Amino acid sequence: MSERDSESSSSITTLDDTNVKEVRSVESLDPLSASLDVQPSSGSPSSILTIKTSSSTTLDEYSHSCPQLSTARLLAAHIGAALALFLATTDATIVSTSLPTIASELNITRNEYSWVGIAYMLTQTAFQPLYGRISDLVGRKWVLYSSMFIFSLGSLLCGAAQSITMLLAARAIAGVGAGGIVSSVWVLTAEIVQVQNRAKWSQALSVTWSCSAIAGPLLGGIFSDNHDSGLSWRYGFYLNLPVSLVAFAVLFASLRHVQLGKSSNTSWRSFLRTFDFGGLCLFMVGSSFIVIGFSLASQNGWTSPFTLLLICLGFLILVGGGVYETRTKRDCLFPAATFSDLRTIIVMTITFFHNVTFNAGTFYLALFYQAANGSTPLEAGFKLLPYSLGSSLASMPAAWFMNYWQRRTNSTRGPHLVVTAGLLISTLGFGLLNLLDERSTISAELFPLVCGIGLGMLFHAPYQVFTRSLKQRDLAAGTSAFFLVRFTGATVGLAVAGAIFDARTYTRIPPQLLTNGGSSIDFTRLGALQPLELKVKVLHILATSIQMIWTVCAPCLGLSFLISLALLRQPANVRETSSDEEKTSKSELA
């Protein structure tokens, strides 16, 4: 048996049949909570929950049993964890409504505008696979506490930034901490809760994740729209400090003297020997080249040799990374099925385009409301509610439908149907966004609601399809790969949307509206532009420039919809693994 297969096989654990249904309900609520995976067995009646991380570590490999905590301490621990998770996920979108204000104050150039969001997500993505393995070595609590400190430091530097360079560096630091928070919170809270109670406790964290999509744009708008009270966009970052301190105090007090042991069979030596550093570097370098290429396209030209070199080289590196993943002897980031199974390829493609369009919509709808529709930052935050609230709420009935369909038909066809329906609705929604202009009123909020409902249906269902396409021993690596693609799609989406906006805007906008040597727009002057004919012209330019982003997003979703039809032809019967099949699987690993 190879070293990689040996470690992968350690992630196969069983749970008694009485708890299968309850824990599976967690999987349907949120893709992160879906990393808690179970498998029924006809063997021992003991209940063991497999905790999936990027390191394939399972709960039974730890030297401690589940601690017996009072309900009050469990509640306090989950409140602290929810606060930390809320901060990390909200910070990804809090700049969406405050970016025009930040751009005007710091004289952000057109190439730097999207990077305020990209820098945060890029480092969050890059460090994601490391956290599971490091927490095996030093413990979950210390990874979470360290991540909260790094996140707070990055937030402090963001608030104090006096230049765009300092802001981007601070956002990158905050992203490193946010990745650790997101990765650690789910596993740590699962470790302190008894198996039979994990579903109801995890639901609270799922609600927190959904609320952050709503709160981010609103908070950004509040702090950017209250100059008379002395507040500014900087306080949106400063607010993270006291909340992080409260979250840390609550977590530290509730988990004091609680032994959450380290993995009993992991060492720094084995980590350095088996972790796929090469695959991670290839994936991130390739993705970064693509992001940088699109970001510089409007400045250097779409046909510029430098632009084409970066984008083409990025794709070639990603292809090379895929070849490397199929041949490496280390714990690869992507399981072999990712490149050979039709369903996993389809789901990865859908996940990538879903996050491209969702992030492009979040950031550039906020800009549309302020720049073209004449809204203040706070008004833009409220106008984004149909989009963000629709996407958050739509994920819940989608999860209920998938559970209902599986119980009624004993089939996994439910996630396939949800994926196809979500793509169809979101394609229609982004198509309708092309009808928006600077004069739009009710439709400017109704059409984004259609987009949000469709995109919300795609938050969980693709992961359900993806994990059922993998063998049990590949679930850990597959989950890591899924979230790498998801975060990368969000990062690339911002870069592509920024490149489209810049290319359409800066060649048409009047020079007197440009600042910083013609490399940035003073969005604060739009409302007071005179004469009226000039104002109408500028607003129309901005509206049609953002409209081109929807023109690109809609076909991407439409293509994904056509591809998703192939999922409906795939086998979808529920097949429980018997004890004989489990023995056969283990003998194959040997």
Image (spheres, grey):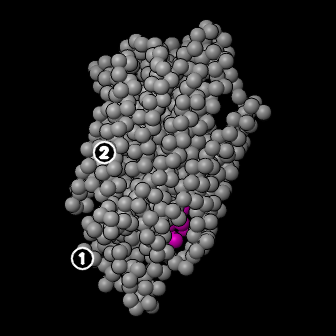
Q: Nearer the viewer, residue 314 or 202?
A: 202
Amino acid under disc 1: Gly
Q: Residue at x 70, y 41 (%)?
A: 401
Q: Quadrant of residue 152?
A: top left
Q: What residue would you read off at disc 2?
A: 241
Going by the image, does 382 lie left or right of 137?
A: right
Which of 163/76 is in front? 76
Crowding at label 2, few (<14), some or many (≥20) Cα neighbours within 10 Å? many
In magenta, the rendered stretch is 547-555
Q: Measure the C-alpha gap from mark 2 to mark 1.
A: 36 Å
Q: Which mark is residue 517?
A: 1
What kind of secondary structure does the magenta stretch mostly adopt?
A: helix
For the residue marked with disc 2, what is the amino acid?
Answer: Leu
On the image, the x and y values in percent for residue 586 come to 55, 14
Horizontal side of residue 486 vs 118, given as left or right? right
- Name the residue rendered at 45%, 35% in the picture: 79
Query: Which mark is drawn over residue 340?
Result: none
Q: Is residue 561 above or below residue 511?
A: above
